[in-house]
Image (cartoon, grey):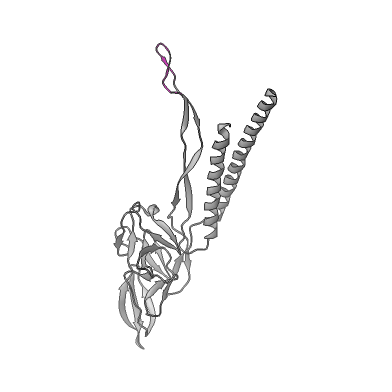
């Protein structure tokens, strides 16, 4: 069998993975706080037919070798944390992080997770939770008699209660930063989990230590750009077709060889 068959097959598999990643990006184009992913690849081992630097004759060495590659393999999917567009909702419990960092939440199972989804709600116990029902950490409780809520850029949450709108600071939203946010694990539900690659979170007050600030009344849209994804999709499709064409070319070469031998 020609090596081109297996080499081209790895190329087709790689382009299929790109298409799958693009499909997920496009599917989440309206997901609050979603960050697009891209696939990184590495070339596979090489068959070294001749070593570079070999001696051709006395005092003369070859400036290059003779190598044949065996294809490509996916190395990682990289999540890109560029800022998404800010959408003005006017809703007092909608917040967006302008800059670096994540909201810290606790799941129903008590696990710590991180998100850029700032579409907050008040649950039955008066606690601030995300749209998925995960409670902010540290927890913040809104009084039942609160008439309005103000959230400052530094994360200070103030509830105004009573007929005279008495202000009462009920908590402070914190932001978690990571040395390598691309190392976070995607858990679904707009949630990310800490890994050994991401490092431990540095939980700080918004606007300090390089963390972003809180924008009340806004939501961060996904950073997926439809034009970019469609261009990448066309390129992946063409690359897939070219790899398939290489397999057909190899098949025709074998067919010609068989005809010559028969």
Residue 97: x and y in percent read 39, 63
Which picture quadrant has residue 239?
Answer: top right
Query: How many numbered markers are drawn?
Result: 0
Residue 114: say if magenta. no
In the displayed structure image, the side of residue 233 where residue 139 appears, left or right:
left
What residue occupies the far top of the structure in this picture?
58
Residue 207: x and y in percent read 32, 62
What residue occupies the far front of the structure in this picture?
262
Residue 79: x and y in percent read 44, 53
What residue occupies the far bottom of the structure in this picture?
163
> Which one is in front, 65 or 95?
65
Which picture quadrant has residue 255?
Answer: top right
Residue 10: x and y in percent read 53, 41
156, above or below 3, in the image:
below
Determine the residue positioned at 47% across, 31% down: 46
> If the image is split into quadrants, where does the N terminus sit?
top right
179, above or below 92, in the image:
above
Determine the residue positioned at 44% across, 68% down: 218
39, above or below 24, in the image:
above
- What residue range appears in magenta? 50-62
Determine the residue positioned at 61% across, 40% down: 244
Residue 51: say if magenta. yes
Determine the residue positioned at 57% across, 49% down: 233
> Which one is in front, 221 or 163?
221
> If the image is split into quadrants, where does the C terminus sit?
top right
């Amino acid at each position: 069998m020609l090596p081109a068959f297996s080499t081209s097959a790895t190329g087709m598999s790689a382009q299929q993975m790109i298409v799958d990643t693009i499909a997920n990006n496009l599917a989440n184009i309206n997901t609050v706080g979603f960050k697009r992913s891209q696939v990184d690849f590495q070339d596979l081992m090489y068959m070294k037919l001749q070593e570079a630097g070999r001696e051709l004759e006395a005092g003369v060495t070859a400036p290059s070798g003779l190598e044949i590659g065996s294809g490509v393999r996916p190395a990682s999917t990289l999540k890109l944390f560029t800022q998404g567009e800010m959408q003005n909702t006017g809703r007092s419990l909608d917040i967006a992080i302008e800059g670096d960092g994540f909201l810290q939440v606790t799941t129903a199972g008590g696990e710590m997770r991180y998100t850029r989804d700032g579409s907050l709600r008040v649950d039955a116990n008066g606690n601030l939770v995300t749209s998925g029902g995960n409670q902010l950490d540290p927890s913040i409780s809104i009084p039942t008699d609160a008439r309005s809520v103000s959230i400052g850029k530094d994360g200070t949450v103030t509830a105004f209660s009573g007929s005279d709108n008495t202000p009462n600071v009920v908590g402070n939203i914190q932001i978690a930063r990571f040395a390598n946010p691309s190392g976070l694990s995607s858990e679904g539900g707009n949630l990310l989990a800490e890994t050994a690659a991401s490092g431990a979170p540095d939980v700080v007050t918004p606007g300090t230590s390089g963390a972003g600030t809180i924008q009340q009344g806004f939501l961060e849209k996904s950073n997926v750009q439809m034009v970019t994804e469609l261009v990448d999709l066309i390129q992946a499709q063409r690359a897939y077709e070219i790899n398939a064409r290489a397999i057909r070319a190899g098949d025709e070469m074998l067919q010609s060889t068989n005809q010559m031998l028969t």
